[in-house]
Image: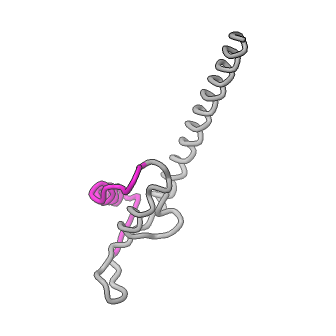
């Protein structure tokens, strides 16, 4: 998702990944770069070196068309999982509420 809105470089992804709530604190850089290389090997991400400005070159990553398709499938799957979790939570709350009433 970090690459869906725009291309980005690894350090920026590391800084922003916690906003999605899957990792507490800063994500380990080695893990992020390992996943980026795997995604690139799978054809889901592409990268190129950018040498703008006076600083060191940065590898900028972006989603490929196939990567966007896979992300869309993953989001649909996650929607289903979220619905399942909400159903579970709602059923739990109903049972909990009924138990509380029966104790009174």
Asked whether residue 28 is drawn in magenta, I would say: yes
User: Which quadrant holds residue 80?
Assistant: top right
Instruction: Please name the residue shown 51% across and 62% down the image.
Output: 4
Give x and y (percent) for residue 48. Answer: 34, 74
Give x and y (percent) for residue 96. Answer: 64, 20
Answer with left or right where residue 39 lies relative to residue 102: left
Q: Name the colouring of the figure.
A: one colour
Closer to the camera in the image, 77 or 88: 88
User: Which quadrant holds residue 88?
Assistant: top right
Closer to the camera in the image, 42 or 53: 53
Residue found at the very far bottom of the displayed protein:
54
User: Which quadrant holds residue 31?
Assistant: bottom left
Instruction: Please name the residue shown 41% across and 68% down the image.
Output: 12
Position of 101 relative to 28 (above/below): above
Answer with left or right where residue 30 lies relative to residue 7: left
Answer with left or right where residue 95 lies relative to residue 36: right
Give x and y (percent) for residue 29. Answer: 30, 60
Asked whether residue 37 is drawn in magenta, I would say: yes
Q: How many marks?
A: 0
Position of 100 relative to 42 (above/below): above
Instruction: Please name the residue shown 69% across and 22% down the image.
Output: 94
Position of 79 relative to 71 (above/below): above
Position of 87 relative to 51 (above/below): above
Give x and y (percent) for residue 75. Answer: 55, 48
- Quadrant of the snapshot with the C terminus: top right
Answer with left or right where residue 53 lies relative to residue 93: left
Instruction: Please name the residue shown 48% across and 62% down the image.
Output: 65
Residue found at the very far front of the displayed protein:
104
Q: In the image, which residues are magenta?
A: 23-48
């Amino acid at each position: 998702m970090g690459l869906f809105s725009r291309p980005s470089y690894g350090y920026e992804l590391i800084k922003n990944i916690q906003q999605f709530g899957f990792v507490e604190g800063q994500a380990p850089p080695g893990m992020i770069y390992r996943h980026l290389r795997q995604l690139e090997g799978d054809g889901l991400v592409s990268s190129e070196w950018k040498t703008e400005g006076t600083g060191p070159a940065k590898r900028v990553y972006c989603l490929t068309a196939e990567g966007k398709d896979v992300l869309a499938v993953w989001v649909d799957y996650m929607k289903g999982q979220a619905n399942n979790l909400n159903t579970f939570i709602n059923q739990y709350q109903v049972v909990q509420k009924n138990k509380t009433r029966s104790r009174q």
